[in-house]
Image (tube, rainbow, N blue to C red):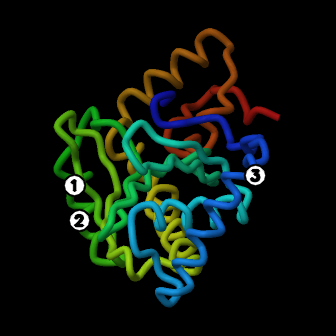
Amino acid sequence: MDPHRRAPARGLPRGADPPQGRVHRRRRADRRRAAGGHPVSSADLVALVRDVLDETGLEWEAGARDDELVVSLPGEKKLRTVVSLVCGDTALSVSAFVIRNPDENHGEVYRFLLSRNLRLPGLAYAVDRSGDVFVTGRVPATGVDARYLDQLLGVVLTAVDEPFNELLVMGFLTSMRKEWEWRVSRGESLRNLEAFRHILERPGDPPRDT
C-alpha cells in the first residue's frame, strides 16, 4: 500500500523572486500578450505555468529535466498526485503516476483503464517498462493558457484519484488481505485500510478505528 500513498500536500514555502527575476517574467508576459495571450517559446510556456501555479498556491518545484515543473495535487482517495509538466516550444507534456505494477489481475486492470481512456479528454493511461501505470498527455503550446492549465490539472487529478481504490482492489487484493490479517494479529491500527473494510473484514475483527 505504501508505494501508492503519500502524505497530503501542505504547500511549499517559496521565497520572493529577486528583482531581476520579476523583470524577466514581466517581459515574458508582455511577449505572451503580444502573441494573443499564448506562449511563443518554451521559456514563455514555463513562465505562464509558473505564474498560474503561484496564483493557485499549489505546491510545485523545478523538475530534473529542462523546462520541467513538478506539481503536487491533494486528493481524496490518493492523498497526493504528483504531476510532471514539461514545457516545449511546440507542446506541453503532462504525466502523473497512478499505481505501481499490479501484483495480480493485469488483464482486468488494463481493460478497466482502457475503458476509462474513452472518457479522458486529451489524456490516456499508459504503462512504462516496469509496468507502472501513468496518465499522460501532450497538448499544443499555443492552446495553453491559465484557464486551460487549470482544467488540465483538474482532469489529471480526477484520472488518478477517482479510480484509485478500485485499482488497488483489482491489482493488490491478495497483498491487502495479508496486510489486514497481519495488523489484526498484532493489534496494529487498521486506519490505512479502513476504506477497504467491507472487502477485508472477517468475523471477530476489531471495530473501525476512531
Q: Where is residue 97 in the image (x, y as percent from the top left)?
A: 40, 46
Check disc 3 and report the residue beneath it: 19
Residue at the (69%, 22%) spot, across then down: 189
Check disc 2 and report the residue beneath it: 114
Instruction: Please tell me which residue lies in front, 131 or 45.
Output: 45
Q: How many labels does the image show?
A: 3
Seen in the picture, residue 193 relative to 175 is either above or below; the reply is below
Residue at the (53%, 25%) spot, across then down: 180
Cα–Cα span, label 2 and label 1: 6 Å
- Horizontal side, residue 63 vs residue 57: left or right: left
How many other residues sit within 10 Å of disc 1, few (<14), some (14-19) or many (≥20)?
Answer: some
- Horizontal side, residue 115 vs residue 48: left or right: left
Seen in the picture, residue 200 relative to 152 is either above or below; the reply is above
Q: Which mark is residue 110?
A: 1
Cα–Cα span, label 3 and label 1: 50 Å
SS of the residue at dot 2? helix
Cα–Cα span, label 3 and label 2: 48 Å
Name which quarter of the figure residue 203 lies in: top right
Q: Which mark is first along the chain, 2 or 3? A: 3
Which image quarter holds the C terminus? top right
Q: Which mark is first along the chain, 1 or 3? A: 3
Residue 116 appearing in the image: no
Residue at the (74%, 43%) spot, across then down: 14
Residue 67 appearing in the image: yes
SS of the residue at dot 1? helix
Q: Where is residue 67 in the image (x, y as percent from the top left)?
A: 42, 51
Amino acid at the residue labelled 1: Tyr
Amino acid at the residue labelled 2: Leu
SS of the residue at dot 3? helix
Query: Looking at the image, do the residues carrying marks 2 and 1 touch, with CB atoms under 8 Å apart?
Result: yes
Q: Which mark is residue 6?
A: none
